[in-house]
Amino acid sequence: MTNDLADILKYAAERGIALPPDLLLELASKDASKQIGDIVITPDMLPLFTLKEPGAVPPPKDQGLILGSDGWIKQPGQMMSMRSSGGLKVVEPFIALGMYDAEPARASESHIHGGLLSLADGDPLDSDPTDIDVTKGTGKLIIVINAGSDIAGTITITGTSVDRNTGAATASDTDDIVVDALTTDDSTTDSNGNTVHTYTGAYISSKWFVGEVTLSTTDLTLTDVDVYHCSFEQINDQTKLTLTTFDANIFTTNESAEFDAYLYTLHVTGNKCRIDKEADLHVGADGVEALEDKYWRLRRGDINEALNGSTDGFWVEVHYSNSPAYVEDVTLKVWAKRLFTRNT
């Protein structure tokens, strides 16, 4: 009790003045507020913060930390597992890339985080000269060589290149692709007529091109060449990546619903690449039969495919075969983990 309140009560008592209860409560409240306002507590007056006891919290030594029950911790958003090996701690933060489509278009195909787009199909390319001219959006070129007689030489790609970091365009740029063998095409077709891509020994440009592009050669005789635009997710060029899981949650509105989703990877070695189907999810002809007004949780969690994000990548293709699609409320995710080590 402060001196002001004590003086008021003493004055009233000496003169026989009875103070009403509501006035006493108001005076006591103001007195308590004044006492609290006068309190000054500095961190050195408190014990240090611990898991069991409150106390002062020293400032964090690193950026990007938040205060949790154990003190300063890394901000959540990435799940992380850790294991020790030979004095090193292997850290595995998990990354999830997802998409949502409330109502897919009828009889449509969705490309997520990249995809293949056919630009030329079965064209000849030789020194006659017989060139291949295509027009494309921004991205790399995939060349699939199916047949030819002279298959040791060089394909020159000529067009406007785009710097993938700055976006700067260079007109009349070139990219030489050394050819030494045919491509192995093991692509198949699913029950709904969708192409499932698999290529070994395909060729890939080292640069992004845009607009009108010409493929030419002075020393090859190729009779069947497919050309694709290709874009793919590299998780910001992160190395030591491992794709772990491909999952989906969808809603079917009719027993005739068809849902086919494919996770593809692209591995690059020099100017060659390999395209693989890593996992697939289905409702309908190639999976479980659809039901009316039901949700479906689909998952493949045993992928464990290593990627070098500085060169390699992945994308997802989804096919809705009906018109209307009979599929709604689609959520898709690709999970990956990144490996790196720390000294213990």
Image (spheres, helix red, strand yellow):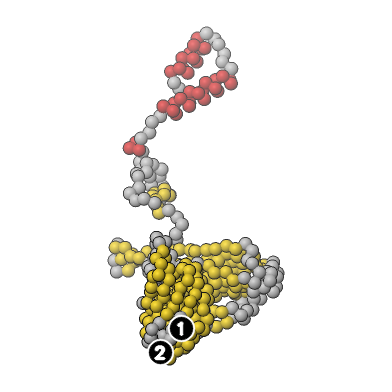
Residue 30 screen position, x and y as percent: 50, 23
Residue 275 visible in the displayed image: no
User: Badge 1: how crowded within 10 Å, few (<14), some, or many (20+)?
Assistant: some
Residue 302 screen position, x and y as percent: 48, 74
The three-letter code of the residue at mark 1 reads Thr
12 left or right of 105 in image: left
Residue closer to the observer: 102 or 164 = 164
Decide which of tag 2 and tag 1 comes sooner along the chain. Answer: 1
Residue 239 visible in the displayed image: yes
* Residue for point 49% across, 11% down: 11
* Residue for point 54% across, 69% down: 111
Residue closer to the observer: 144 or 235 = 144
Residue closer to the observer: 342 or 113 = 113
The three-letter code of the residue at mark 2 reads Asp
Q: Which mark is residue 113?
A: none
- Residue extending farthest to the bottom is 149
In the picture, the quarter occupied by the C terminus is bottom left
Q: Which mark is residue 150?
A: 2
* Residue for point 46% across, 57% down: 77
326 left or right of 3 in image: right
Residue position for label 1: 130
